[in-house]
Amino acid sequence: MPPYLLVSRSAEYESRLRGLLGGRLAVVAGEFLTFGVDAVIKRVDGTPRIALLGPVLNFEETRGIARELTDRHPDIGLVVVREQRSDLEDWVDELSLHAVLSPLATDETTIELIERLSAWLVVNGRADKEDFEESDAVDAGETSDDVLAALVASPSAHPTSDVDDPVDTDRTRLGPDFDSLTQVQPEQGWEFPPLESGVLSEAIAVVAPKGGQGKTTIAINLATGLAEVAPNSVVLVDADLQFGDITAALGLVPDSTIVEAAGDAAADELVLKTALTHHDDGFFVVASAPSPEAGDAITGTALAVLIERLRATFRYVVVDTTPGLPEHTLAMLEHVTDAIFVTNMSVPSLRAMRTEFELLHKLELTPANRHIVLNQTDRLSGLTTRDVENILSAPVDVEVPRSSAVLLSSNRGVPLIHDDVRDPAAKAIRSLVMRIAPDAYPKRTRIHRRRRSNESQ
Ligand SMILES: Nc1ncnc2c1ncn2[C@@H]1O[C@H](COP(=O)(O)OP(=O)(O)OP(=O)(O)O)[C@@H](O)[C@H]1O
Ligand SMILES: [Mg+2]
C-alpha cells in the first residue's frame, strides 16, 4: 500500500512528486472536491502514513480532508503544501499539521522533509519502517530509502522522541524541532539585492476569463503609466505564453524571451537582466515565448519563481495573462498583490467574470487588491454600468470607453497614454494607474483609494 498520499489540484506538482516518490505515492485529484470531502476520502486506499495536502486547496477543503484523515488514521502525518503567505499562521494554529512545505521548495528539500517526517513517525511508533519501503517493482530511487534509514538511525533525526502518546498531534507537544519541520522554505539562491529599504514591490496581474477584452492594452498602458512614477523600476511580463503579442504592440524586437527569463540560469541576476528588453518609456519587457510549443514548456512553478525574482528588483511587476484561469495563471495569482479584471459589456463576458470571481474566492486565490475594469464601454451596448454591477455582484472601479485611438496607438507601436494624452480611454487608464500608485500625477486632487477585494465581495 503506498505510504504517501497527495491531494492537490496541481497536475504539475503531482507529476513532480511522482518523480520523487515513485510507486510510494498515491494521488487523489483535488478536482473530486467538487463533490465534497467524502468523494476524496472514498478514493483513499489502505492506510496512508503521510498525507500532503495542496497546492491549490483552500482552507476549508484542507481542514475537511485533514479532519477525515485523522479520524480514520489517527497516526497519520499531515503536511500542507502551500506558499508562506500571511494567513499561514492561522492554518498552522487551527489544523493539526506536522509540516508546511512550499511548492517551490527544491526536490532535495522536499524529499528531506518527507523523509524526516517518515522517520519521526517510525521513531514515535506511529508507523513501521517497512511501511515506507517500496512494496512493488516501481523504483523510487535508492537515495530515499537510504536517507530514511540514516535518519532513523541518527539521534538528530528524533526531533520528538520524548512524545510518547502516539495519538497526540498537538503542535505544542511536538517540541522545538517541530518548528524546523514547519519552516521549510524554497532555496533562494536567486535572491537579488533588495529594493530601497521600506519600498515594497507590487505585482499586478491583468486577467480576464475571455479573450479579446483588452488585457494587453491595459497591461501595456499601466506599465507605461507606472514607469512615470518609478522610471526603470517597472517590468511588464508577457505571460500569455502561447500567443503573447506585447513586443509586437510596442514595436520591440527582443533578443531573449520568457523562456530564458524563467529558465534555471536566470537564477543569476545578470542572466535575468539580459533576458529583459528595454522600452524607451522607462520600463522593461519580458517577451512572450517564441512559439506556442516553447510557451507550453514553461511550468506554473517557473512562472511563479520568475515573478518572485522580478519582485526582488522591480518596484512594479505587471503581468499580462492568457484568457481564463489555466494552471499557470492560478500559480501566478498566489504571487501577486493586485489583480485587474478586465471585461467588456457583453453579457457572456460579464457572466464568465462573475464565475471567475466565485472560483477564485473558493480557492482563496483572490489577490489582496482587486480592481474591476469595464473596457470598451459604449452607450449603445444596451447595458448601463448599474446593470453590469448587478451581473458581477461587484462595483466597477474604472470604465474605459471604446476609442479608435486604442487601435491606432497599437498599430503605431506606441502606448496609448503617450500617443494621445487627451483621448478619453487614455485618461481612464491613467485613473487606473492612480489606483495602483496613488502618488502618480500628484497635481490631480482626486486620488482613488484602493478597495480591498473582500470589501466588495
Ligand atoms: N477601449 C478600447 N477601445 C477600442 N478598442 C479597444 C479598446 N480596448 C481594447 N481594444 C481593442 O480590442 C482588441 C483586443 O484588445 P487586447 O489585445 O488588449 O485584448 P486581450 O484581452 O489582450 O486579448 P487576448 O485575449 O487575445 O490576449 C485590440 O484590437 C484592441 O486594440
Ligand atoms: Mg492579450
Image (cartoon, rainbow, N blue to C red):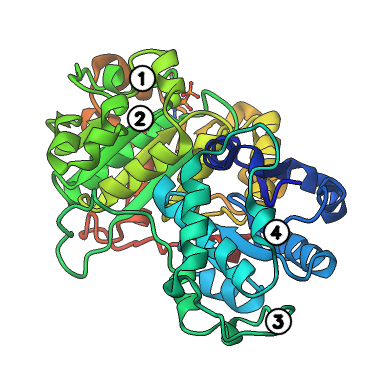
Q: Which quadrant of the picture is home to ligand 2?
A: top left
Which amino acid lies under the numbered mark 4 shown in the image of this protein? Arg
Which comes sooner in the sequence, label 1 or label 3?
3
Quadrant of the snapshot with the C terminus? bottom right
Above-or-below relation of 45 to 118: above
Residue at horizontal 47%, vertical 70%?
Answer: 157
Task: In this rendered view, identify the residue nearer to me: 194 or 285.
Answer: 194
Name the disc covering residue 306, or none.
Answer: none
How far separated are the C-alphas under marks 2 and 1? 8 Å
Q: Determine the secondary structure under disc 3.
A: loop
| Mark 3 lies on residue | 168
- Compared across the picture, whether 439 is left or right of 63 comes to left
Which label lies toward us, 2 or 3? 3
Q: Do the residues labelled 4 and 3 touch (CB within 8 Å)?
A: no
- Marks 2/4 in contact by CB < 8 Å: the verdict is no
Q: Which of marks 2 and 3 is nearer the N terminus?
A: 3
CB within 8 Å, label 1 to label 3: no
- Name the residue that disc number 4 marks: 49
Residue 317 position, x and y percent, is 30, 45
| Mark with earlier residue (2, 1) | 2
- Residue shown at the point (33%, 15%) measured from the top left: 290
Q: Name the residue under label 1.
A: 245
Residue at image mark 2: 238
Do tag 2 and tag 3 residues touch (Cβ < 8 Å)?
Answer: no
Q: Is residue 276 left or right of residue 375?
A: left
Q: Does the residue labelled 1 lie within 8 Å of ligand 2?
A: yes
Where is residue 447, by image quadrant? bottom left
Q: How far apart are marks 1 and 3 (CA)?
A: 56 Å
Image marks 2 and 1: residues in contact by CB distance under 8 Å? yes
Of pointers 4 and 1, the one earlier in the residue sequence: 4
Q: What x and y, as percent, mark residue 327?
A: 56, 36
Asked if residue 107 can be seen in this view, the reply is yes
